[in-house]
Amino acid sequence: MDKIREYFEKELGFKKHTDNFLDDLLKILKSKKTGKDTDFIWLKKETDALCRLAKKEGFQTEGKKTLIHELLTGYLKKEADAVPFETHPLKMISMQKEIENQYRLVDIMHRHFNGYEALEAGDYGCHIKYGRPERTMKVEEVLAEYFHAEAAALVRGGGTGAIRAMCYASLKPGSRILIHDAPLYKTTGITLEAMNVQIVRTDFNDFHNIEKELKKGIDVLYIQRVRQKLSDTYDEISIIEKARKIDPKVTILTDENYAVNKVEKTGASAGADMSAFSTFKLMGIPGIGIVIGTKKMIDIVHEQNYSGGGQVQGPEAMKTLRSLVENPVLLGVQSLSVDEIVKRLNQKEVPHVEKALKANIEERIVLVKLDLPIAREVIERAIDYGALPHPVGSESRYEVQALFYRIAKVMIDENPVLSRYVIRINPMRSGPDTVIRILNDSILDIMKQKEH
């Protein structure tokens, strides 16, 4: 039964109930009891794989597939229920604050551009005085003021490019960088690996762990703003403030992707040396990122990005700024939609929804836990009702209809069983009625398939 055990632990993510499941499975395989084998709507691939492995062990599975399927369904639910399904979402700013942010950004634009400049596209090339387009430089001044930072830099490569620029400006080979003990975004991990730095991991949910590492000696403290795990509770702003008291000289970097214009402050406005994020997630054009922070560090970013081909040109900078104006109020509307969806789902408006939570695992989303392992089937069916099949930005200018998608890969890596029970829903620009209708109809369609 070693191969079957391996399948359950590695492929299905069983952690607690493997032994009990194997004992009950063995009873079924050795029993003379059989029944009618039928097609399954969920866990078909897993049941077939289990039967193949059992046959290799010398067992007969004909007439026992349904029994095995029922056993698998029951134990998978036990595994899923063993994972605490709770979140600790970031505190979102109010709709009124989002409106004020729009007004404030436009007010800043009035004070940096005269009326003729406001209607111009912008210039190209490395201005002899600034080393980048003059209009890009002026847009960066607007962004720095808007985000309460000393300086800002527009860079190529979206959020990934911004994080890399931030890391290149502050890390050297061999530098010790402290990160949260959780799966990193893949591109961030690649950046740190390529830079040949020493990665130190600790649990950020308890600041005493950070304090201990800072006292040992750390060059850079790197904080990702949005949650990496369901269990994450740490507060970025509190960490920055406490870390500064322990080691005033430590360089603090923050990844603000999916948090900008949703929370009160960025890391840079709270005392971090630099913060990085993508404008594509803020309704901007593809491929542009922002680094904000101290003038000293942003000057290094500009110095390292002197090449003409690496510059964000003036027209791109203006398009980015104009797009950013639309973002705060849209995010406020989206947040209201998320709140209403969670409220209604937890009032049992949709069958087979066990629980709904607000979360900041990547973007602001609804996590929906079902009472059957049909999350993947519901997602596939929702696409036929107009739900987006995959993210683009996420929350980019191209994403208007609601997104029904698998949970974030960092969550799957931590608890694979949840991928069969939990759906990630981002309403994008849609209202609660639309999301609830699609979810309800998709689940009903799957259950009708089972009845037939």
Image (tube, rainbow, N blue to C red):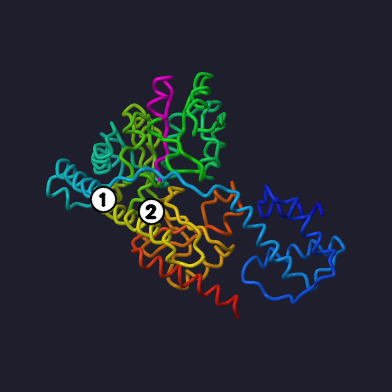
Nearer to me, 81 or 441: 81
**What residue is shown at x 34% (from left), y 36% (from top)?**
292
Q: Give, as a three-letter code, the residue at label 2.
A: Pro
Q: Is mark 2 on a helix, strand or loop?
A: loop
Cα distance, mark 2 to mark 1? 26 Å
Q: Give the range drawn in magenta.
A: 239-257
Could you tell me residue 209's position as x and y percent?
52, 27
**What residue is shown at x 42% (from left), y 66% (from top)?**
349
Label 1 environment density (alpha carbons within 10 Å; few <14, some 14–19, many ≥20): some
Could you tell me residue 438's position as x and y percent?
43, 69
| Badge number at residue 400 | none
Q: For residue 398, which quarter of the picture?
A: bottom left
Nearer to me, 401 or 278: 401
Taking the image as shown, residue 355 lies to the left or right of residue 435, namely: right
Q: Compared with residue 243, is residue 223 higher up or lower down, i.e. above or below? A: below
Nearer to me, 342 or 117: 342
Which residue lies under the disc numbered 1? 95
Q: Give, as a three-letter code, the residue at label 1.
A: Met
**What residue is shown at x 84% (from left), y 66% (from top)?**
31
Taking the image as shown, residue 307 lies to the left or right of residue 183, namely: left
Of the numbered discs 2 and 1, the one sitting upstream in the chain is: 1
Residue sticking out furthest to the bottom:
452
Taking the image as shown, residue 346 lies to the left or right of residue 216, namely: left
Is 445 part of what is drawn in magenta? no
Residue sticking out furthest to the right:
58
